[in-house]
Image (cartoon, rainbow, N blue to C red):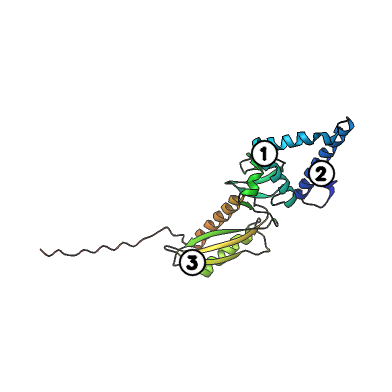
């Protein structure tokens, strides 16, 4: 039913997980009652279990509660591109205890749910799939800034992964020590899982266009002045 709906993948996954656990809980209660076990008799057992949880299963309980919070608040969802604890990847599964994140190297990382509640999490696609990248470029002081801007915009417009709306733009960032520094700002939805790929594509094309147009990309330079004074003896 959910696969035929218009809901996004993350919403369908959250609803499916919640419904599955609700059905399991109701099924356990029905089974216990059907075999003649009085649920009220389990009060003492539940109290003892609570003490055991308090002493020995704190981390498990913390991750379990965190999983419920994630499913209802949805700070992350299946399909999101996230960064947490130095790990960057796509969320492929959210269970009650842990969340599975697959990196660009196709490595599955199992992250405890409590990490998403107690730590800072960067979600690249929380609101929508549009993400802006800032590509920093430096040129020689002898170059015309307007010409540099025009070339950078042409590079962005010719890249199929860059969105036309919002349109790319160029910022004259600063007068650096050895260069005029610009920032090419582009929006994309296709390569948020592979940000380095988009940067590489743009840098390759920028280098080619600069070389063809004779635009110099400087290296750090310093002027050294040596004073030679005659010694009076």
108 to 70, vertically: above or below? above
Distance of label 3 from label 1 (alpha carbons)? 57 Å
Choose between 74 and 135: the one closer to the eye.
74
In the structure shown, which secondary structural element does the residue marked by tag 3 occupy?
A: strand
Q: Is residue 9 left or right of residue 182?
A: right
Instruction: Between label 2 and label 3, give the one nearer the viewer.
Output: 2
SS at circle 1: helix
Which residue lies under the disc numbered 3?
174
Instruction: Kindly report which numbered mark, 3 or 1, lies closer to the viewer in this rendering.
Output: 1
Q: Is residue 158 left or right of residue 223?
A: right
Where disc 2 sits, the SS reads helix
| Residue sitting at x 69%, y 52% | 75
Mark 3 or mark 1: name the one nearer the start of the chain: 1
Picture residue at 57% right of the left edge, 59% below the top: 134
The residue tagged 2 is 19
Q: Give coordinates of residue 29: x percent, y percent.
A: 84, 36
Q: CA distance from mark 2 to mark 3?
A: 54 Å
- Measure the alpha-carbon separation of dots 2 and 1: 27 Å
Observer-nearest of 85 and 30:
30
The outermost residue toward the left is 233
Q: Earlier in the sequence, mark 2 or mark 3?
A: 2
- Residue drawn at x 88%, y 30% is 36
Q: Where in the figure is residue 4, as x and y percent of width and height?
A: 84, 48
- Residue reaching furthest top? 35
* Mark number, residue 54: 1
Nearer-the-camera pick, 164 or 2: 2
x, y (%) of residue 166? 67, 64
Res 130 seen here: yes
Q: Residue at x 55, y 55 (%)?
A: 203
Tag 2 and tag 3, C-beta contact below 8 Å: no
> Could you classify mark 1 by the number of other residues whose Cα lies within 10 Å: few (under 14), some (14-19), or many (20 or more)?
few
């Amino acid at each position: 039913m959910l696969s035929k709906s218009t809901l996004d993948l993350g919403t369908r996954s959250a609803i499916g997980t919640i419904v599955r656990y609700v059905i399991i809980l109701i099924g356990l209660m029905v089974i216990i009652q059907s075999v003649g076990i009085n649920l009220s008799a389990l009060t003492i057992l539940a109290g003892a279990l609570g003490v055991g949880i308090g002493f020995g299963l704190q981390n498990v309980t913390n991750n379990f509660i965190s999983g419920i919070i994630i499913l209802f608040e949805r700070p992350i969802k299946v399909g999101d591109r996230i960064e947490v604890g130095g790990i960057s990847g796509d969320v492929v599964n959210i269970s009650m205890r842990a969340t599975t994140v697959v990196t660009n190297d196709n490595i599955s990382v199992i992250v405890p749910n409590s990490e998403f509640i107690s730590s800072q999490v960067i979600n690249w696609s929380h609101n929508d799939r549009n993400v802006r990248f800032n590509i920093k470029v430096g040129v020689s002081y002898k170059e015309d800034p307007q010409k540099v801007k025009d070339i950078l915009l042409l590079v962005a417009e010719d890249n199929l992964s860059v969105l036309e709306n919002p349109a790319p733009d160029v910022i004259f960032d600063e007068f650096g020590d050895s260069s005029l520094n610009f920032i090419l700002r582009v929006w994309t939805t296709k390569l948020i899982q592979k940000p380095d790929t988009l940067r590489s594509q743009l840098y390759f094309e920028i280098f080619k266009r600069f070389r063809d147009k004779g635009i110099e990309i400087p290296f750090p330079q310093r002027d050294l002045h040596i004073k030679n004074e005659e010694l009076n003896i």
